[in-house]
């Protein structure tokens, strides 16, 4: 199964007012020693960092946060001693705000330690939508002594074995970090001016140089990625009984992200092959014109390029089931249409080759076509190839009915 501890090596952020206590060897100090023993670098805070500084922690692999930032010990809590409700609410509000900021910046295990009831803290987190109803979150609410007894890394290993999605993402992240570092070292040793050459090239092409430069870097990282060796035990053998609990919508979301870029992630000033537009709940359009022809040329306005739009509509669940062939693992398509599975909000769209419209970008904007995103290769490539074959088809004479055996 490999050393799962390595997935959590790196920077560990510990936030607790009892760090480096002069009076005694506290539980939090013992946990810090555990992290340091595993060669983790520990960043210590005795109070919640300012939200503006939280971005500096986005590279952390692990967070440990004390819920009770006030001088009330566990013995006092057990004896009924409590701080005023107003002050308690202030501490809790700061904790929640910090956790929300970290969750936006970084997916990493977060241990929250409390002298209060664990159920009480979990209810607070659920109310603020930081955790869900089950016990499958990456935010752990624990007692420090319980974690010390079980072992911090034993707890983490148990968690990641039970969460294949977290395991896969952490393993991929390791490979990505290695590839990114390789790219940076190699490119920095090259001429420092290579970005200018690429930038000017794309300017001459009339496309967004920022978008294309970013795409170039992404492809270079991808070309340096080593195959990731995922553990079959975690991915299959331990979880076969869980598959029946996975909903269709959850899988559709994963597939949609692999083939469709949402509009808010696109350059709003450029239109390319695969752009999908919507006019109402049942009418969709996809641009199949080559990218080089979607760019405004010298002397043309930015709204002048023509887009070639195939019209389409969503398939119902019964239509999807009717066309799905388990032996191929695919939806079979007629000659005059392309079917794109789970492309937008779980919808499967059928685009008809017979229904082609040619519109300028300006007409699209005026007629309230709303771009919802972009289909990406290899799905756009296959769609365009199939349309090209359809547009050049030859008709054959009809076979007489009498010639068909009855």
Image (cartoon, rainbow, N blue to C red):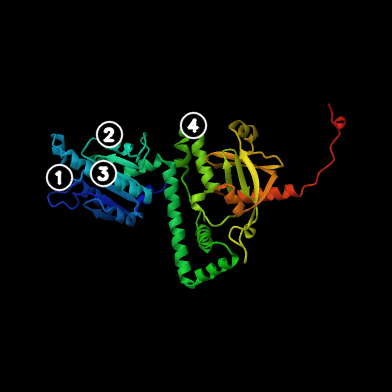
Q: Secondary structure at mark 2?
A: helix
Q: Secondary structure at mark 3?
A: helix
Marks 4 and 1, the one that precedes in the sequence? 1
Question: Label 4 to label 1, Cα distance in Å?
Answer: 48 Å
Question: Label 3 to label 2, Cα distance in Å?
Answer: 17 Å
Residue at 13% of width from left, 38% of height from top? 76
Residue labelled with disc 4 = 244
Q: Position of residue 365 (x, y in %)?
A: 57, 51
Residue 93: mark: 3
Marks 1 and 3, the one that precedes in the sequence? 1
Residue at 23% of width from left, 53% of height from top? 45
Tell me, yes or no, whether the two marked residues, 4 and 3, touch with CB atoms within 8 Å: no
Label 4 crowding class (10 Å Cα cut-off): few <14, some 14-19, many 20+? few
The answer to whether residue 273 is seen in the rendering is no
Label 3 crowding class (10 Å Cα cut-off): few <14, some 14-19, many 20+? few
Discs 1/3, front: 3
Question: Label 1 to label 3, Cα distance in Å?
Answer: 18 Å
Question: Label 2 to label 4, Cα distance in Å?
Answer: 29 Å
Q: Secondary structure at mark 1?
A: loop
Q: Is 352 positioned to the left or the right of 96 in the image?
A: right
Q: Position of residue 162 (x, y in %)?
A: 40, 39
Residue 71: mark: 1
Residue 144: mark: none
Label 2 crowding class (10 Å Cα cut-off): few <14, some 14-19, many 20+? few
Residue that extends furthest to the top in the rendered view of this protein = 406
Viewer-side residue, 362 vs 270: 362
Residue labelled with disc 2 = 119
Q: Is 361 positioned to the left or the right of 402 in the image?
A: left
Tell me, yes or no, whether the two marked residues, 2 and 4, touch with CB atoms within 8 Å: no
Marks 2 and 4, the one that precedes in the sequence? 2
Viewer-side residue, 371 vs 126: 371
């Amino acid at each position: 199964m490999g050393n799962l501890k390595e997935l959590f090596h790196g920077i560990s952020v510990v936030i607790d007012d009892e760090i480096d206590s002069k009076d005694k060897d506290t539980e939090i100090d013992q946990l810090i020693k555990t992290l340091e023993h595993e060669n983790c670098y520990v960043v210590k805070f005795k109070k919640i960092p300012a939200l503006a500084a939280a971005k500096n922690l986005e590279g952390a692999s692990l967070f440990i946060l004390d819920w009770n930032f006030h001088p009330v010990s566990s013995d006092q809590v057990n004896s009924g001693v409590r701080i005023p409700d107003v002050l308690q609410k202030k501490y809790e509000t700061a904790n929640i705000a910090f956790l929300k900021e970290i969750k936006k910046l970084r997916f990493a295990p977060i241990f929250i330690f409390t002298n209060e009831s664990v159920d009480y803290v979990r209810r607070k987190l659920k109310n603020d939508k930081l955790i869900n109803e089950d016990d499958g979150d990456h935010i752990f609410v624990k007692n420090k002594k319980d974690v010390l007894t079980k072992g911090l890394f034993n707890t983490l290993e148990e968690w990641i074995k039970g969460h294949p999605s977290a395991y896969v993402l952490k393993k991929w992240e390791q490979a990505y970090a290695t590839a990114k570092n390789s790219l940076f070292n190699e490119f920095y040793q090259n001429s420092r001016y290579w970005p200018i050459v690429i930038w000017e090239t794309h300017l001459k092409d009339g496309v967004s140089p920022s978008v294309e430069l970013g795409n170039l870097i992404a492809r270079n990282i991808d070309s340096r990625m080593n195959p990731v060796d995922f553990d079959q035990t975690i991915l299959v053998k331990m979880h076969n009984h869980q598959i029946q609990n996975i909903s269709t919508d959850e899988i559709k979301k994963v597939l949609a992200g692999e083939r469709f870029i949402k509009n808010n992630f696109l350059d709003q000033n450029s239109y390319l092959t695969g752009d999908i537009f919507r006019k109402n709940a049942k009418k969709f359009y996809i641009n199949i014109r080559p990218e080089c022809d979607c760019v405004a040329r010298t002397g043309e306005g930015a709204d002048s390029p023509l887009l070639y739009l195939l019209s389409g509509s969503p398939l119902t669940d019964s239509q999807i089931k009717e066309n799905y062939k388990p032996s191929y693992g695919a939806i079979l398509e007629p000659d005059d249409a392309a079917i794109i599975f789970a492309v937008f909000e779980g919808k499967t769209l059928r685009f008809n080759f017979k229904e082609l419209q040619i519109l300028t970008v300006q007409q699209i904007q005026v007629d309230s076509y709303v771009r919802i995103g972009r289909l990406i290769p290899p799905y756009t490539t296959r769609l365009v190839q199939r349309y090209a074959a359809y547009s050049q088809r030859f008709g054959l004479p009809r076979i007489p009915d009498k010639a068909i055996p009855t």
